[in-house]
Image (cartoon, helix red, strand yellow):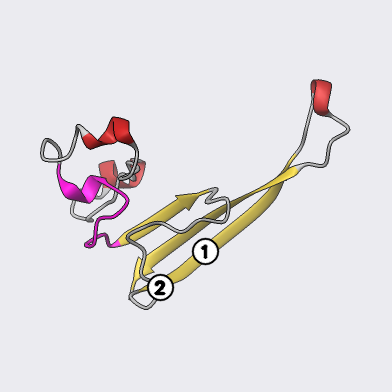
Amino acid sequence: MALYFYFPEIRWVGLLDSTAPDNQKFRGRIPDDQFDDGADADWYVIWDPRGEKARGLDETAYEKVWEYSYANLRTGWNRNDDPFVRTYQVYRRR
């Protein structure tokens, strides 16, 4: 959300999960572009999608400009488990 703060002219998707029942009460009270199915975002920043796609992300209209993955190391009780990988992706409108 820092990007939205510094660049308010950018149409930014706040990524409220549009299918979550707790978020349905906000429909009509906050702008539709604050949900993950918004169609007019200039940028998508996806934090650890875990194999799922953002609902409003049409890859023909957006290009991936950055992706980063890293192994999240385990500590404590599960330190012997394999680390899980987190991925971050940034897309911009073509």
Choose mark 2 or mark 1, whichever is in front.
Answer: 2
| Residue at far top of view | 76
The image quadrant that residue 38 belongs to is bottom left
SS at badge 1:
strand
> In the picture provided, is 48 more to the left or to the right than 41?
right
The quadrant in which the N terminus is found is: top left
For residue 34: magenta? yes
Which portion, as a residue range, is magenta?
31-42
The quadrant in which the C terminus is found is: bottom left
- The residue located at (78%, 32%) in the rendering is 74
- Given residues 36 and 90, the one toward you in this image is 36
> In the picture provided, is 67 more to the left or to the right than 53?
right
Q: Amino acid at mark 2?
A: Glu
- The residue located at (47%, 68%) in the rendering is 65
Q: Check contact, mark 2 vs mark 1: CB within 8 A.
A: no
> In the picture provided, is 66 more to the left or to the right than 2?
right
Q: Please, is residue 79 above or below residue 8 in the view?
A: above
- Given residues 26 and 88, the one toward you in this image is 26
Q: Position of residue 29 (x, y in %)?
A: 11, 35
Report which residue position mark 1 lands on.
66
Q: Residues within 10 Å of mark 1 (few under 14, many from 20)?
A: few
The image quadrant that residue 62 belongs to is bottom left
Report which residue position mark 2 lands on.
59
- The residue located at (26%, 59%) in the rendering is 41
Q: Position of residue 87 (x, y in %)?
A: 60, 52
